[in-house]
Amino acid sequence: MKDFYYETMYILRADLTEEQVEQAIAKYQTLLTEAGAEVQDTQHRGKRRLAYLINKQREGIYVQINYTGDGSQIAPLERALRLSEEVLRFLTVKQEVRPPAPVAVEA
């Protein structure tokens, strides 16, 4: 089956402690890995002001996970994100994995 490159960005509540944020990040990484995805990169982008109120919150902690998989990992991840009270919003974007462009060797 063909692998795709996925990027999921989610926003955690700003009132979480640093330990709770790290636990949430680890939980979603583990969920992806157990579902068969290969996590490429995780970026903790920090606390930022939201453009508008979400669940009466003015700030949120942004986290981005980049991973590859065949697509079957998306539903369990998004279900967990949707049911979690610590997650305000999430978005998953898909791109095809492209082979690296050939590099010309100077002679």
Image (cartoon, rainbow, N blue to C red):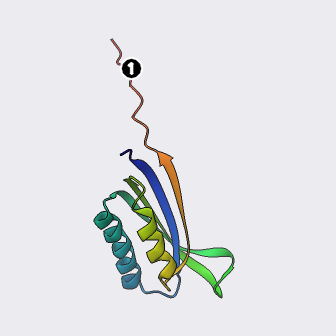
Q: Residues within 10 Å of mark 1 (few under 14, many from 20)?
A: few
Q: Is residue 51 above or below residue 104?
A: below
Which residue ends up furthest to the right in the rendered image?
52
| x and y percentages locating residue 75 in the rendered image | 45, 67
| x and y percentages locating residue 9 in the rendered image | 51, 65
Residue highlighted by disc 1: 104
Q: Which residue is located at x 50 percent, y 47 percent?
A: 95
Q: Which residue is located at x 39 percent, y 35 percent?
A: 99
Q: Which residue is located at x 51 percent, y 52 percent?
A: 94
| x and y percentages locating residue 33 in the rendered image | 30, 64
Q: Amino acid at mark 1?
A: Ala
Q: Is residue 88 above or below residue 77?
A: below
| x and y percentages locating residue 97 in the rendered image | 43, 43
Which part of the image, by quadrant, shows the C terminus?
A: top left
Circle 1 SS class: loop
Quarter location, residue 105: top left
Left or right: where does residue 70 sit relative to residue 47?
left
Q: How many marks?
A: 1
Q: Which residue is located at x 43 percent, y 38 percent?
A: 98
> Is 48 in front, or is 79?
79
